[in-house]
Amino acid sequence: MSKTYKVKKVIVKTEYKVLAALLIILAGGLVLLPKYEKNSGIKPEIFLKNVISTERYVTTDLIADKIIKQDPNLLLIDVRKKEDYDSFSLPNAVNIPLAEVLSSDSEAYLNQDAFDVVLFSNDQCYADQAWKLCNRLGYKHLYVLKGGLNEWFSTIINPKEPKVTDSELAFKQYNFRKAAAMYFGVGNATTTTKVKPKKVIKLTKKKKKVAEGGC
Amino acid sequence: MGPLIPNGVIPPEWNFVIAILIGIVFGFSLEASGFSSSRKIAGVFYGYDFAVLKVFFTAALVAMIGVYYMDYLELVNVEELFVLPTYTWSAIVGGIFMGFGFVVAGFCPGTTLCAAAIGKIDAMATMVGIFIGIFMFSELYDFIEPLFDSSYLGRITITDSLNISPYWFIFLFAILAVITFYVVDVIRKRVKKVFY
Amino acid sequence: MNKLSKIKKNSHIYWNPYFGGLMLGLVILFTFYVTGRGPGASGAFKSTIVTVVDDIAPTHAENNAYYNRFIKKGDSPMNTWLVYEALGLLIGGFLSGALSGRLKLYVQHSPKITSKKRLIVAVIGGIAFGLGAQLARGCTSGAGLSGMAVLSLGGFITVLSIFGSGYAFAYFFRKNWI
């Protein structure tokens, strides 16, 4: 008993050699593992859930209200082509054509925490596509203008007068829309709204919010 | 999938229960490794007991390797974990203070809690000292703040700053650790034994 | 009686340091997996101080930029993750000590110094540790172990600095230990 103990004490114990080798093999395994490009962005299942959900749609009434009240958190993004944007757009909208949604300049507008970003196009098709691309990348606070600019014209700019039989709510809505139409300029719908590009402070690339820590 | 609580896999109400459970295992491991004895801890500075160094670096290595395997298997995303932000100078100066405190008191905040739990009065004294130190820091905060907030580098990892792959870094770190463990054993044999 | 003396004799038998390291490493790993950040210890001390100061002198705590960071309206600063974890630490330490017969109320010190001196240096060391842990935003556990686990640059700098300064100062305090 004491003899074996002595032998063990003289040299480094075999167990330790094995353990050391195991440790190095485990660490080396990380180096040797085949590397693959990780899926950046959210999981397909979550993406599907987000796509099915209609939470992303905002109504024209809500947006009109926000524009009139000059909501500081609102950021409108026009995803149509530049020519369309130049001829007409919503006040203070920023133009990011669908083709440029993934460019690094656009990321500062789309991947941020400061604004509620509302995407819009003529109908909601392009805006929806842009939204899907961004949602897939995990960007937050993105919305789509329901019905797009077409809806904007038929509801805000040229609201239909409700029938006498309609509810009080419908009248209230109509009154709001008429007032909003005044604000946006009735009859001048085809003229170019003067667009001042909204100043967006370019955000430094923010990593995903992580758990608060520190001791 | 992970981290489980921030991603909502485990409801946040469990947070504090899990905190206590983690604390219990953490405390048990510290105490059972002998960190409730200041004389054992101080041994690392005088060469008669390197348990602190062995435990500390083994733990760091196991955690490192584990985190990166879990990242590889997509159990957690390393990018989502909390990384201590780097403030170069406050980390260095703070470390110097802590090193001084370590060799003078023989405890660090975690081990002093364990030692106090089993009745070491010197550990309780260290706890009092730590409270005073934090109180002093807070009261002197206006004076310290320029240093505290200076040289901010953000959420940066050592592999970012050295510009090497984290996998290689961990591999090299593991080799370095094994060599260190061997060397400290050699040193310990040459140093006069201290019984405590 | 015989059993008791046996326990007493074995009270200095600790875990193999590599096994202890493995267990600690797994705890850290598990903590990251569950909560997204690592365990720490000095945070609980800080919360206690903030709570005490906030109770005794609320206006003072409000005006101090450092306390103010941790005071939440309508919630005690004690109600944080790290405080519960520290509570667990105390329980865990006690359990381990109880199981291996190390529960004993006494001042542990080198035979070359008195208990009184040991207590004084323990307080002084604690003060330095408290100051340093706040400055470096974490102690050996929170900044060192948890920081190193995710390869934080700050964690590595802190660890190097702690051990570097520990060895640099070790010579001057050798009489306290050996």
Image: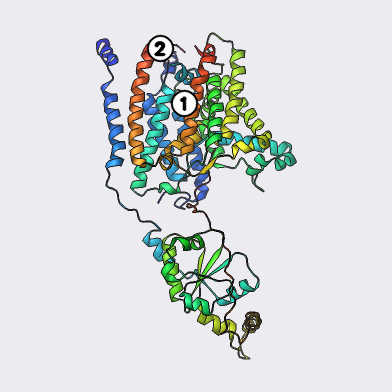
Residue ranking furthest to the bottom: A164
In this view, the mark in front (1 or 2): 2
Residue A21 at x, y percent in the picture: 27, 30
Q: Nearer the viewer, residue C127 or A192?
A: A192
Residue A100, x across and y down, in percent: 43, 67
Q: Looking at the image, which is closer to me, B154 or C62? A: B154
Which amino acid, by three-letter code, is at mark 2?
Answer: Val
Q: Callout 2: residue from which chain?
A: B
Q: Residue at x 48, y 36 (%)?
A: C155
**Picture disc at residue B191:** 2
Q: Are marks 1 and 2 on the same chain?
A: yes
Label 1 sits on residue: B31
Q: How far is disc 1 from disc 2 in space, using C-alphas?
A: 25 Å
C7 sits left or right of C88 in the view:
left
Q: Quadrant of residue A60?
A: bottom right
User: Residue B1: image x %, image y %?
Assistant: 40, 51
Would you say B99 lies left or right of C74 here? left
- Mark 1 residue type: Glu
Classify A56 as above or below B112: below
